[in-house]
Structures are given as structure tokens and as C-alpha cells.
Image (cartoon, grey):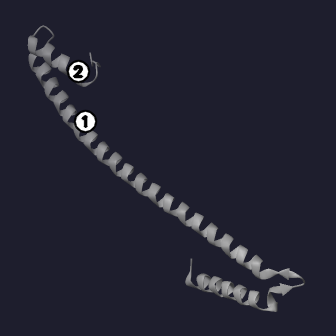
Amino acid sequence: MTLDREKKIAEIRKSAEEARKTDRAWVDGQDYADDVEFLLDELERERAAHNAHVAELLEKEAEVEKIQELAVKITKEREKESAKLNQAVEALEKIKKYYGEEGYYGYSVANQAIKSIKGGESDE
């Protein structure tokens, strides 16, 4: 809340208190000082609720930022691991190519390792 609003509310509260002490609080048989005080109290409750809500939103925003940072970190780690696995697959493909055909033990081992890395997929 701005300083001007706080100052104005303080002035209204003071006027309500002063009006209660004099006949000015009564206009046409109505005690407006109580009404003004009630409205100011309501305003204060609403402001407190609003501030609590803003604080809660700020906390949630901070949590979201932490989760986003974690997601970025995990994504980068997975990209690194994926690159390592791709390098391993390339090396195994070279081994398969070196052995040339299925009958050789090195070819079979390399092929099985590639399947394992790719989650059971095969390029054959």
C-alpha cells in the first residue's frame, strides 16, 4: 500500500474517533463514525488476506523456479548420458563392422550390447 493511502486511512480513522467525541458523528440520526470504523477494519482484513495470498504465490513461484532449475539440470545430465550411449553404440557398430558377419563372437557380443543400450531395439 502506498504511503498516501496509509496516510489517508490514518486521517479517516482519526476523524472517526474525533467525530465520535462530538455531535458530528451523528447525521440524520445515523452514527457514521461506527460505519467508517467498520469499513476501515474490513479494509484492513482484506489487505491482510491479500498480503497473505501474495506471500503464498511468491512461495509457490520460488518452488516452481526450483523445480524448473532441477528439470534443466536433469535434462542436461540426460543429454550427456545420451551422448555417451550414442558414442558407445558407434564404437560397437565399428566392432560389428570389423568382425563383418554374425558368425563371429565379437559381432554377436557387440550386437547384443547395442540391443541392450537401445532397450531391445535392433537395426537388423
Give the SS element for disc 2.
Answer: helix
Q: Is residue 38 left or right of residue 6?
A: right
Quadrant in the rendering for residue 76: top left
The residue labelled by disc 1 is 82
Q: Which badge, 2 or 1, comes first in the chain's sequence?
A: 1
Give the SS element for disc 1.
Answer: helix
Residue 116, label in figure:
2
Toward the top, the furthest residue is 103
Question: Which residue occupies 16% across, 30% down?
Answer: 88
Toward the right, the furthest residue is 28
- Whether residue 72 is visible to the viewer of this picture, yes or no, is yes
Question: Which residue occupies 39% across, 54% down?
Answer: 65
Q: Position of residue 102 (x, y in %)?
A: 15, 10
Q: Position of residue 89 (x, y in %)?
A: 19, 27
Quadrant in the rendering for residue 74: top left
Q: Residues within 10 Å of mark 2 (few under 14, many from 20)?
A: few
Which of the image's four quarters has the N terminus?
Answer: bottom right
Question: Which residue occupies 18% across, 20% down?
Answer: 113
Question: Which residue occupies 68% across, 76% down?
Answer: 40
Q: Amino acid at mark 2?
A: Ser
Q: Residues within 10 Å of mark 1 (few under 14, many from 20)?
A: few
Q: Position of residue 15 (x, y in %)?
A: 70, 88
